[in-house]
Image (cartoon, rainbow, N blue to C red):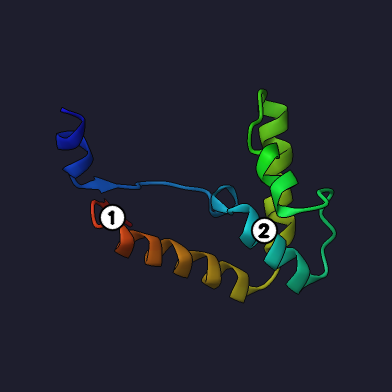
């Protein structure tokens, strides 16, 4: 049954691009845009993704909004999503 469900086509109908940033991309955008993140490393930021409350989630979400500054930032993020969808053909954007 699990294999069947995984093989079904899926569509992501709505997302907030700020909430889709992986730690590596958040660090890259922060570096490119001169934004200081309160995390010493990608690994520390990744561990922050294990939030336990809405407030912790929102804090992380708003860090994502801080690093997205230029039109190019949004384009680069969307391009990564398209590339990912090519790796997993059951997900449509």
Disc count in the image?
Answer: 2
Crowd tier of the residue under label 1, counting other residues whose Cα lies within 10 Å: few below 14, some 14–19, many 20 or above: some
Earlier-in-chain disc, 2 versus 1: 2
Name the residue located 47 percent from the left edge and 65 percent from the top edge: 80
Residue at the far top: name it: 53
Quick check: 77 above or below 32? Answer: above
Q: Quarter of the image containing the C terminus? A: bottom left
Q: Is residue 16 left or right of residue 93?
A: right
Q: Quadrant of residue 47?
A: top right
Q: Is residue 75 left or right of residue 89?
A: right
Q: Which residue is mark 1?
A: 92
Name the residue located 66 percent from the left edge and 30 percent from the top edge: 51
**Viewer-proximal residue among 48 and 69:** 48
Name the residue located 71 percent from the left edge and 53 percent from the top edge: 42
Pointers 2 and 1 in contact (C-beta within 8 Å)? no
Helix, strand or loop at disc 1? strand
Q: Is residue 86 left or right of residue 49?
A: left
Where residue 50 appears, x then y in whole percent? 63, 32
Quick check: 73 above or below 62? Answer: below
**Viewer-proximal residue among 16 and 25:** 25
Q: Which residue is mark 2?
A: 26
Crowd tier of the residue under label 2, counting other residues whose Cα lies within 10 Å: few below 14, some 14–19, many 20 or above: many
Where residue 66 appears, x then y in whole percent? 74, 56
Query: Which dot, 2 or 1, sits closer to the camera?
Result: 2
Q: CA distance from mark 2 to mark 1?
A: 23 Å
Where residue 14 appears, x then y in whole percent? 41, 46
Helix, strand or loop at disc 2? helix
Q: Which mark is residue 39?
A: none
């Amino acid at each position: 049954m699990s294999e069947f469900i995984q093989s079904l086509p899926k569509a992501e109908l709505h997302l907030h691009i700020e909430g889709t940033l992986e730690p590596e991309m958040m660090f890259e955008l922060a570096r490119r845009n001169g934004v200081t993140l309160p995390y010493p490393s990608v690994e520390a930021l990744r561990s922050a993704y294990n939030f336990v409350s809405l407030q912790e989630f929102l804090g992380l979400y708003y860090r994502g909004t801080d690093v997205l500054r230029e039109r190019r930032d949004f384009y680069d993020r969307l391009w990564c999503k398209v590339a990912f969808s090519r790796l997993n053909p059951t997900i449509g954007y």
